Amino acid sequence: MSNKPKQVAILGLGIFGSTLAETLEDFGVEVLAVDIDPVCVSRIKDNVTKAIVADVTDREQLLELDINTFDVAVVAISKHFEEAVTCTLLLKELNVPYVIAKARTKRKKIILEKVGADRVINTEKEMAYKLAKHLLRRSIVDLVELDEEYSIVEIRTLKDWEGKSLSNVNIRRVYGMNVVGIKPQGSLKMTMDFSADYIIQPGDHFLVVSKTKEVEKWDFLTKE
């Protein structure tokens, strides 16, 4: 996907699904969170746009959710693989533009792709990759590969940037990164409402987009 989705449906509210739903909502995406377990739905209902109890393997219930109006649907079912397969198949039959599913084995990944998943992720594998990046690049807080070409990365302020404006540092020209969000020191939320005159403070975090291959070259991020 090249554009930021406006509406995302998360189907399955375990740890992965719930965390993804709340994170997307924090970044301004409208999230529909769905699970068959009322307890899971109740736990997240105040943190997302809409939370509903429904059986995501039931075609009629998916239709009632207007699931085909969402830009992206994420099948976050982990306990029962057959349900994940059924849900993925139904979502594609109902013309959801982009469906993401999760699998722990290569065989399951192939099956999900066969029934129409546009992308299949291995959460354990991707988390290991992100942890390795965190250890190797101490200024990297989080990293998500958007696709084979681009990554979105949360980084800490470098010492050299402190007290300077964004325009003075010129992160885009010097480092090849586009700043899309700032989490000011002491804040828990990222804001996308900032100007080039923003003065960088110690402890600030930045959300940046960069070409994935360039991330490997970020030796400057090994600085404390």
Image (tube, rainbow, N blue to C red):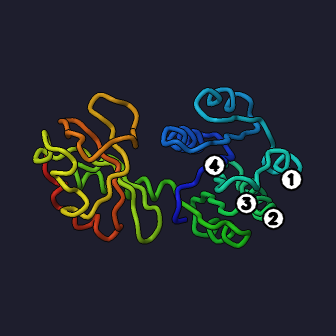
User: Residue at horizontal 47%, vertical 67%?
Assistant: 147
Q: Tell me which amino acid carries mark 4.
A: Gln
* Badge nearest the viewer, 3 or 4: 4
For label 3, the SS is: loop
Q: Earlier in the sequence, mark 3 or mark 4?
A: 4
Classify mark 1: helix, strand or loop.
helix
Checking the image for residue 7, the label placed there is 4
Q: Quadrant of residue 150?
A: bottom left
Q: What amino acid is labelled 1 in the image? A: Arg
Amino acid carrying label 3: it is Val
On residue 59, which mark appears? 1
| Marks 3/2: CA–CA distance | 8 Å
- Separation of disc 1 and disc 4 at Cα? 20 Å
The residue where tag 2 is placed is 93
Pointer 2: residues within 10 angstroms few (<14), some, or many (20+)? few
Choose the circle earlier in sequence order: 3 or 1.
1
User: Relative to residue 134, is residue 127 drawn left or right?
Assistant: right
Disc 2 marks a residue whose amino acid type is Glu
Tell me, yes or no, whether the two marked residues, 1 and 2, touch with CB atoms within 8 Å: yes
